[in-house]
Image (spheres, rainbow, N blue to C red):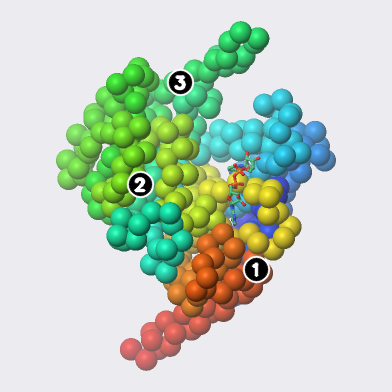
Amino acid sequence: MNLKVTLLPGDGIGPEVVDSAVLLMNAVAEKLNIDFVYNRQLVGGCSYDKHGTPLTDEVLSACYDSDAVLLGAVGGYKWENLPQNLKPEAALLKLRKALGLFNNIRPAKVYSSLINASSLKPEVLEGTDLIILRELTGDVYFGEPRGFDNDHGWNTMIYTREEVERIARYGFELARKRGKKITSVDKANVLDCSQFWRMVVHEIHKDYPDVELKDMYVDNAAMQLVRNPKQFDVILTQNLFGDILSDIAAMITGSLGMLPSASLGKSYALYEPVHGSAPDIAGQGKANPLATFSSVAMMFDLSFKMPKAAGIIESAIDKTLNMGFRTADIYSPDSILVSTNKITELVIENFNQIYNEQELNVLLN
Ligand code: NAD
């Protein structure tokens, strides 16, 4: 089977984690008889340096012509003072809009071997398994008018009915397959846009009476995420609130380097780690590629409909952590510090081993 994947490594540690992910994808491909056809393109600061824009039409065409897109991260000190529309991060917003990626799925689960890497107490974390479902193409990020002059700065928080309905439906369907609980997070006590969000979510809820719906203000949700994260199953939220809450949720897993994400639309899908380009550690072999590996697992599950392969990738990550291997961001004195390349090698070794054991079991049973 041929599968076309557009690779957008981006800036900073982006190329390091994407290169590692490609090694893992090739290992999976070998087992499953897949031929990956990769199309590697520049995006973000590196694209600005070469083409004067963070996102070219050629990149968009490559994405339209692929079965999935894998992105590393964009941004860095070098490009901080560019105008908003030329900043590396502008490429992300344009990509999301152009590919219609309204649905951002960010799972945050606790790896038992990493429970001490978090700043939260183990008893608070134990058993946490939640998904932040963040709307990605509306809200203040895209609302017009926007701008600033000497005396004012302004943005527009806006949602259409269609935008809220489609993400709410996805959320209820997702919750149905999990713990059947949705917490819809908004700021309806202050913001009209959030009141509208809440009204539409409740209307859609009527079609999903088997799923429990709870509303929560975003300030309370931020507190509850660190007080008692186990209470959550699916958190459904607006673009801006989801951006902030998912960084808080990073502390559940111990590091930003552990959080994967999938962004889905009607026709396209993009997978990327939640973290940024980490310019402070770029090029030093210190980047944790595990969030990108989990993003690849989501790609196998959601885009290629190969949940078994996704499960084995997750098991390989788990096993590598259980063996005590850690990159610097999740290192503790009782573990073994390894580089990006070494942890990649170990996860691939474990993937092959778990795959072979499962094959053998099928043959023997
Ligand atoms: P960041 O996520 O890049 O880094 C925050 C901290 O976490 C840093 O100390 C970094 O070293 C560490 N870290 C992050 N990912 C890691 C990994 N995989 N392994 C080990 N350590 C890791 O956030 P920031 O410093 O606020 O932003 C840096 C740049 O990235 C900025 O230009 C920002 O705009 C951009 N950014 C891009 C994205 C994206 O591409 N999706 C997301 C967030 C930030």
Q: Amino acid at mark 3?
A: Met
Q: Is residue 172 above or below residue 354?
A: above
Please tell me how crowded label 2 is: few (under 14), some (14-19), or many (20+) other residues with Cα within 10 Å: some
Please tell me how crowded label 3 is: few (under 14), some (14-19), or many (20+) other residues with Cα within 10 Å: many
Residue at position x 25%, y 53% in the image: 179
Q: Which residue is mark 3?
A: 157
In depth, the one of 313 and 229 nearer the eye is 229
The disc at residue 364 is none
Residue at position x 71%, y 33% in the image: 80
State the CA–CA distance, disc 1 to disc 3.
42 Å
Q: Amino acid at mark 1?
A: Ser
- The residue lying furthest to the bottom in this view is 364
Give the label, 2 or 1, closer to the camera: 2
Residue 32 is situated, as x and y percent measured from the top left of the image, at 53, 73
Q: Is residue 61 above or below residue 115?
A: above
Residue 317 is situated, as x and y percent measured from the top left of the image, at 49, 69
The disc at residue 339 is 1
Residue 22 is situated, as x and y percent measured from the top left of the image, at 64, 64
SS class of the residue under badge 2?
Answer: helix
State the CA–CA distance, disc 3 to disc 2.
27 Å
SS class of the residue under badge 3?
Answer: loop
Is label 1's Cβ within 8 Å of ligand 1? Answer: no
Residue 172 is situated, as x and y percent measured from the top left of the image, at 28, 43
Q: Earlier in the sequence, mark 1 or mark 3?
A: 3
In depth, the one of 172 and 334 nearer the eye is 334
